[in-house]
């Protein structure tokens, strides 16, 4: 279960979790890799401090892959 659900009250959690599974983890017309890239771009645009290390490493990997 995602970390941000830890402080969510149980009665709210029973409503939120099925929606999270359906829309975040379920099948969609948008392939999973593109949904993850959209989430990463959103986190970068919001300057999310928890996503910043991952974004930096991802960009380094992209640069290295484009060089070869």
Image (spheres, rainbow, N blue to C red):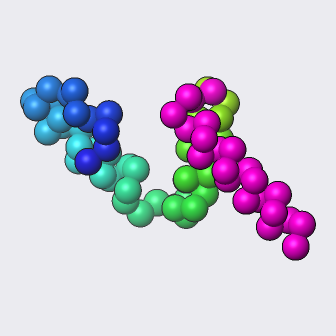
In this view, 13 is above or below 34: above
In this view, 61 is above or below 55: below
- Name which quarter of the figure residue 67 lies in: bottom right
Q: x, y percentage for residue 24?
A: 40, 50
Give the camera-side residue of 53 and 44: 53
**Residue at the location (30% across, 52% down)?**
21
**Residue at the location (76% across, 59% down)?**
62
**Residue at the location (75% across, 53% down)?**
60
Q: x, y percentage for residue 20?
A: 32, 45
Does the image show residue 41? yes
Residue extending furthest toward the bottom: 68
Q: x, y percentage for residue 14?
A: 14, 39
Magenta region: 47-68
Give the camera-side residue of 11 and 60: 60
The secondary structure making up most of the magenta span is helix
* Total numbered labels: 0
Quarter of the image where the C terminus is located: bottom right
Q: Is residue 67 magenta?
A: yes
């Amino acid at each position: 279960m995602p970390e941000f659900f830890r402080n969510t009250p149980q009665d709210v959690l029973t409503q939120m979790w099925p929606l999270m599974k359906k829309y975040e983890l379920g099948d969609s017309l948008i392939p999973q890799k593109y949904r993850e890239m959209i989430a990463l771009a959103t986190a970068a645009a919001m300057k999310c401090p928890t996503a910043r290390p991952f974004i930096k490493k991802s960009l380094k990997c992209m640069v290295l892959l484009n060089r070869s």
